[in-house]
Image (cartoon, rainbow, N blue to C red):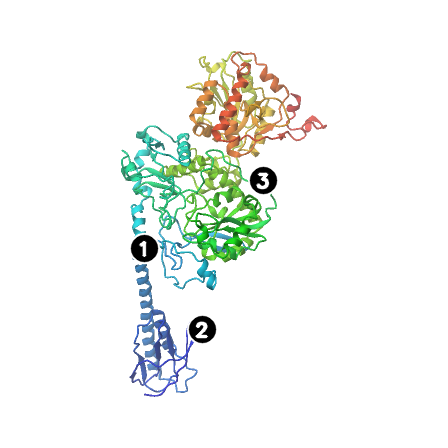
Amino acid sequence: MDAVGVIPAVLADDRVFPPRIPATRIKSDSKSQHAELWIESLSVGRADLCLPPCSSSPHHYLVPRPPLYPPLLFILLSSCLYPSTSSSSSPPPPPTAHMQAKKRYLLVSVGAGLLFLVYLWGLQIGEFQQQPYQYHQFPQYPQYHQPDYQYYHQSQEVYQPLPQRSPSRPPRHWPESTQLLEPYLEGGEQEEDSPQVQHQHTSPRERRAIRDNIYRNKRCRMETCFDFARCQTGFRVYIYPPQRGDEISETYQKILSSIEESRFHTTDPSRACLFILAVDTLDRDQLSAQFVQNVRLRIQSLPTWNDGRNHLIFNLYSGTWPDYTEDLGFEVGQAMLAKASADVVNFRANFDISIPLFSKEHPLKGGGMGYLTLNDAPPSRKYLLVFKGKRYLTGIGSETRNALYHIHNGEDIILLTTCKHGKDWEKHKDSRCNRDNEEYSKFDYQELLHNSSFCLVPRGRRLGSFRFLEALQAACIPVILSNGWELPFSEVIDWRKAAIIGDERLLLQVPSITRSVGRDRILALRQQTQFLWDAYFSSVTKIVLTTLEIIQDRVDSHVSRNRLLWNSLPGGLHALPQYSSDPAQFPFYYAILGKSPWQQFTAVIHTVTPLQAQISPVVKLIIAVAKSKFCAQIVVLWNCEKPLPPRNKWPSTSVPLTVIEGQTKTMSSRFFPHDVILTDAVLSLDEDSVLSTNEVDFAFRVWQSFPERIVGYPARSHYWDGSRSRWGYTSKWTNDYSMVLTGAAFYHRYYHYLFTHYVPTSLLTMVDRMANCEDILMNFLVSAVTKQPPIKVTQKKQYKETMMSQGSKSSRWADPDHFAQRQTCMNAFSHWLGFMPLVHSQMRLDPVLFRDQVSILRKKYRDIERL
């Protein structure tokens, strides 16, 4: 055996290992090419490669003692396939032998590659068998799961989160590094402040048993665990009557009240598509005073429980100290969960619904307005990133909050924590507690919220936090650090447009990420926070209705809303898909889609008095409107008690004239969505309205620029009567207005559908009983949807006097109780919404050159000045 030289082996990461004692080798004769290879396996699984120069000595083939890892085997064989010849002084081998060696080495390389693929495949199968429906967990943080989002860098240096996977598909698992992440803290500080690991009191087998017990039907989807046959007559929700001795918390009573006052509620269980428990399931913390006992027995005794099928269960708090698992204390079966702090691992996508965590002080209706005002440009604020909250010294949820002081700089990043909470906080206090408590008291929380661009939302004991809704309302962009949290209503809301989704393990990167967001992006994110807050989160009613609307979209999937309707003004609650699933059919999305409404309108004239002669006001009105070049058709709603006149009594017009006799002859029927109305624009007219063709044409041109608003002539206003603590109604001509009466106004035909199917039946009944206030109710509805005032256009001064001088006894203007009823309506409508939606305006639109000292021939709408 010839002596050979030994050189250090260089691996892929450029680390050089010193030579070791050679391994056993076998000598083999060969006449063509000679090579020698030395390998010794290290204790950590690596090997030193010894590649001696080629010589005329016989081959030595390796017989490794320990098994080699496939990647190292691949490196070894590649080295043999392409040996270095620079250091060899021997003559080249014969060509034929050289070709045979190449073929042999090529076959060996292919075999090594196949072995490597088999190795990877074996790892894949092993992981799937161990965790069939779980994320691959990181060893240092067993409570965390793979994040749903990652950051990517745009050309504008703006970080945005991107979805890693579809929520309805199980994740694919590939081998990951098992090297632990470096801790935030150093040395002794790490021992002192480091929290106890989650589930320290339960073994993995026990946690798995708890999870399997709660989610026994984890594979439930709408197609497998929901009975669609119950919903054939419509989407109706039934609430079980409370049993004797049931104690219902104030928060759960708000949820039940929201459902009872909605258009979905029914008192007939046979007509119900969805069932709601009367048992309070919001707080399932066994240490809580609101924990309800014997829930399992109560729900299983319900006659239509059926293992939870077609049932919806609301929950805000699950589990208890110290693990805070998702244990509810009873089996949900096939029931859907509307749950706060939902974990992506146990969340049943497209079946359960993630809701926000809200406090018991959260209002039932209305809710506080957002704090973003129109004069908030430029969008920069005093602070960049703020947080103020509890710091848990031990237990679950303490990791991130304990490390916040690392990025707190006391200038533009203010992250304040206190450990002064709980009964025995002093027993667990650390060296930072006194300093943190002192600094914590120096700052006002509301002042921080309203003066910061970003608000940190770290997880608490549970994944969700009250800080989330507080940040949304304050127009403070949430920076979410809660790995594994299924964000509220993530099935329909695109949170990338309103929040920054971070990673708890990458806390130190948060300052650089927030600083990289541009000013225009900050303004867009803040505007979206205000929209989402007002549309879905500002009250308990909106949270509950959003939950029900999402379920209805699943039931009626063929007419469900798309993401544009959910994530754009006015939101999914006001864009009913039963009207149309095409956004172009709504008045809110013309600008986004680059479209415009129809160039014609339909005049709808509400008639309640008999047709006497050709000089009747309604006849004059029909003739004037028919002359408009934008008029497509005229529809007369005959709500008079007298029989319908024959066709020859009506005037002849150049446009189609349709007369519809009302079945109920009620005031609310004037806004019924008749199929005969085909145009986007509707000109609503009272029979005694007096308008010229020029006035109609100009108002229609104005409406085309504001298709989502009411555009018309007669204006009214509202005010707060402090002496009576109620809203008041006035028809006085003042410098502002908040309503445009529908006796002469343009609006989009979608509001007919919304008025009929969205407004509660009790309010429609009230309007029909008084034969009054339907125009006020329409103004309330449109202003609540758009958050904008109507638009008043030029009108003749005589309009008010003409309307008030109608001498007919049947005219409601002659009724002395008319204004008293309208005062009552104002307060009833505001109570329904929970707030006053009407907005005052001082804008009136006139034609160009109106009243200007120029020739009348130069004016387009010259007849308006002559009236």
Residue drawn at x 36%, y 71% as measured from the top left? 44
Q: Position of residue 630 (x, y in %)?
A: 55, 28
Q: In the depicted view, which residue is nearer to us: 413 or 379? A: 413
Q: Position of residue 292 (x, y in %)?
A: 34, 38
Residue 14 bears which disc, if any? 2
Element under label 2? Answer: loop
Q: Residue furthest bottom?
A: 2
**Three-letter amino acid code at disc 1?**
Ser
**Left or right position of 277 against 586:** left
Residue at label 1? 203
Element under label 1? Answer: loop
Vertical placement of 688 versus 2: above or below? above
**Left or right position of 388 against 306:** right
Q: Residues within 10 Å of mark 1 (few under 14, many from 20)?
A: few
**Left or right position of 25 against 362:** left
Q: In the depicted view, which residue is nearer to us: 68 or 120? A: 68
- Residue 37 visible in this rendered orientation of the protein: yes
Q: Residues within 10 Å of mark 3 (few under 14, many from 20)?
A: few
Q: Position of residue 34 (x, y in %)?
A: 34, 83
Residue 373 bears which disc, if any? 3
Distance in Å between CA atoms under marks 1 and 2: 41 Å
